[in-house]
């Protein structure tokens, strides 16, 4: 029967372990100096060698003729291990044996001495899956096991393991394997298996594996089955459901140019060819992250020509907002049956985020020009003639600050959980309007946030960043008119950043602050410049720069 490559080339001793030099050296020295602990915890991403190292360690400590911290591969224990017949090395899958009864059964067998080895080694994989009662049952045994018993716990989620368990183990954190080491290993295996594969294809496999050597070998296995020989970079992406960096660059260019027509044609092509929209979203995250790195650290990449083409097209705050949106999209795609729709919504939101920034930047420049012109006019005229120049003064800033505090106060003074839940349900209907050009921008702004508080009159939306919050509050009259037309309810809304909301929520939940309803006596026309509101524009930074954080 065919044996998968990751099983066939699983390391048999410490010399074959790839990318975990520090851990290998530490364990070797512990064996040489006979300082073997009773319990170990191996943590790290999947496919980085946790279970393989655990098995090798168990094999070596039972070897009859250890040489420089490595096994001899000739003694009875080594031979039994190689033939998978060593009954003194017990592997337990905690995902399927996670109850307290299984742990109690394990404890009953601990006092049995090894059959022919020095140690009886228990390797518990995915240990974080154990129930709390199972963990508690393991505690005492893990602290003081019999002298002939060693525990090796392996997990990808150490934060889910009880602290009392963690404190009883020597912890080793496995790191992701570098692309270079994965490349070398695949090259070696391809030569051994006589697989004809291009270097570019190997590089793509290494990149897509994201530090997991097992994932890399699994991709190689699939590609070999698909293309047999003469494997190219395109073959790798066909099998993996992703696209080449060149095609990804074309998609980013279309996004940068707001070319929605061509973008949706490309998405349709991806869907018909069976591309994986989750992986495509992850690729977009990586690309935009690299644009950010190139923007902040120009010499970070040896060849940054691909990313440097975009650094002038995106502001730093916009890149942060885009990355936040894409991370939300990744979670949404994992929990939906219609990944294409979620991906399309994310594309529209990215364009809206970018365009909102353009509008804000343009308005800031316009206000600076107006203010400079005003100074010139004042300097050139001796009399105070009124000039019809729309400048946002300190009075408007104070009114906006006061409006924000009043609306948050009044919402919490009459907070109604039922209204909150009902309106959250109503907002879901807006997803169907995200593609409507007449209201896409307004829908996108609303869906960018999360409704966190509601009363019979007010709604509070919370946004991940200050920049998105400002963009939302910039359009309060437009948002309110839109909600009124959609749901036939007159609501007053306000946006709050996530950081500020944490302070507000803390005060509200702890009852340390009293919220008494007050009459809102501020007209939106007194806050926003009316001429600019009609044109969907206003000076957001100058309006917001002096607003005190609400807490």
Image: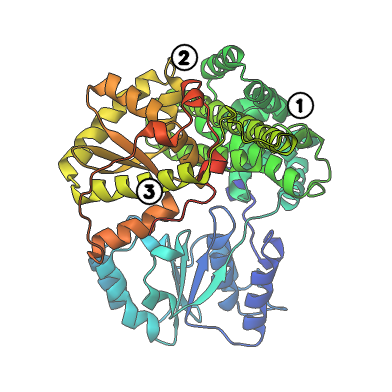
Name of the residue lying farthest toward the front:
383
Vertical comparison of 257 with 402: above or below: above
Camera-near label (1 vs 2) is 2
Camera-near label (1 vs 3) is 3
Q: Nearer the viewer, residue 176 or 225?
A: 176
Left or right: where 314 falls relative to 550: right
Residue at point 69%, 37% (across, down)? 378
Residue 4 numbered mark, or none:
none
In the picture of the structure, the residue carrying the numbered disc 3 is: 402
Quarter assignment of residue 120: bottom left
Q: Categorize mark 3 by other alpha carbons within 10 Å: few (<14), some (14-19), many (20+).
A: some
Q: Secondary structure at mark 3?
A: helix
In the picture of the structure, the residue carrying the numbered disc 2 is: 437
Res 77 visible: yes
Q: How many marks?
A: 3
Distance between the alpha carbons at the discs numbered 2 and 3: 34 Å
Residue at point 26%, 73% (across, down)? 104
Distance between the alpha carbons at the discs numbered 1 and 2: 47 Å
Q: Secondary structure at mark 1?
A: loop
Decide which of tag 2 and tag 3 comes sooner along the chain: 3
- Give the x, y percent position of residue 195: 74, 35
In the picture of the structure, the residue carrying the numbered disc 1 is: 230
Distance between the alpha carbons at the discs numbered 1 and 3: 68 Å
Vertical comparison of 231 with 409: above or below: above
Residue at point 36%, 44% (across, down)? 403
* Viewport quadrant of the N terminus: top right
- Give the x, y percent position of residue 322: 56, 37
Camera-near label (2 vs 3) is 3
């Amino acid at each position: 029967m065919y044996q998968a490559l990751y099983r066939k080339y699983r390391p048999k001793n410490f010399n074959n372990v790839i990318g975990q030099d520090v851990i290998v050296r530490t364990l070797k020295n512990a064996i040489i100096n006979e300082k073997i602990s009773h319990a170990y915890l191996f943590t790290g991403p999947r496919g980085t060698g946790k279970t393989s190292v655990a098995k090798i360690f168990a094999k070596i400590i039972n070897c009859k003729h250890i040489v420089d911290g490595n096994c001899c591969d000739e003694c009875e224990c080594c031979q039994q291990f190689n033939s998978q017949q060593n009954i003194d090395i017990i592997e337990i899958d905690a995902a399927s044996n996670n109850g307290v009864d299984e742990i109690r059964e394990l404890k009953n067998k601990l006092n049995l001495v090894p059959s022919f080895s020095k140690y009886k080694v228990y390797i518990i994989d995915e240990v974080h899956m154990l129930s709390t009662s199972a963990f508690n049952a393991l505690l005492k045994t893990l602290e003081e096991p019999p002298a002939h018993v060693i525990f090796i716990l392996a997990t990808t989620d150490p934060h889910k393991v009880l602290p009392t368990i963690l404190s009883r183990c020597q912890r080793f954190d496995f790191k992701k394997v570098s692309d270079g080491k994965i490349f070398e290993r695949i090259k070696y295996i391809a030569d051994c298996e006589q697989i004809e594969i291009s270097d570019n294809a190997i590089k793509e496999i290494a990149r897509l594996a994201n530090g997991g050597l097992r994932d890399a070998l699994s991709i190689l296995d699939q590609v070999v089955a698909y293309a047999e020989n003469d494997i190219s970079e395109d073959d790798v992406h066909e099998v993996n459901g992703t696209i080449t960096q060149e095609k990804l660059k074309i998609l980013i260019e279309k996004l940068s140019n707001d070319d929605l027509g061509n973008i949706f044609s490309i998405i349709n092509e991806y869907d018909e060819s069976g591309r994986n929209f989750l992986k495509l979203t992850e690729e977009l995250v990586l690309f935009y992250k690299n644009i950010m790195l190139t923007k902040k650290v120009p010499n970070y990449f040896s060849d940054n020509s691909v990313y440097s083409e975009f650094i002038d097209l995106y502001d730093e705050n916009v890149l942060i907002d885009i990355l936040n949106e894409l991370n939300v999209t990744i979670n949404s795609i994992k929990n939906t049956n219609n990944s294409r729709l979620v991906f399309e919504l994310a594309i529209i939101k990215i364009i809206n985020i970018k365009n909102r920034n353009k509008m804000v930047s343009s308005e800031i420049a316009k206000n600076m020009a107006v203010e400079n012109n005003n100074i010139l006019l004042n300097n050139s005229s001796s009399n105070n003639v009124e000039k019809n120049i729309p400048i946002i003064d300190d009075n408007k800033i104070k009114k906006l600050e006061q409006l924000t505090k009043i609306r948050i106060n009044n919402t919490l003074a009459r907070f109604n959980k039922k209204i909150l839940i009902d309106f959250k349900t109503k907002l879901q209907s807006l997803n169907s309007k995200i593609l409507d050009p007449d209201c896409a921008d307004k829908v996108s702004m609303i869906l960018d946030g999360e409704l966190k508080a509601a009363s019979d009159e007010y709604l509070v939306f919370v946004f991940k960043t200050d920049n998105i919050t400002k963009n939302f509050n910039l359009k309060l009259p437009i948002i309110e008119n839109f909600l009124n037309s959609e749901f036939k309810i007159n609501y007053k809304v306000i946006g709050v950043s996530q950081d500020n909301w944490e302070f507000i929520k803390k005060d509200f939940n702890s009852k340390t602050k009293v919220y008494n309803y007050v009459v809102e006596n501020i007209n939106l026309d007194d806050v926003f410049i009316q001429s600019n509101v009609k044109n969907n524009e206003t000076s957001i930074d100058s309006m917001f720069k002096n607003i005190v954080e609400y807490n």
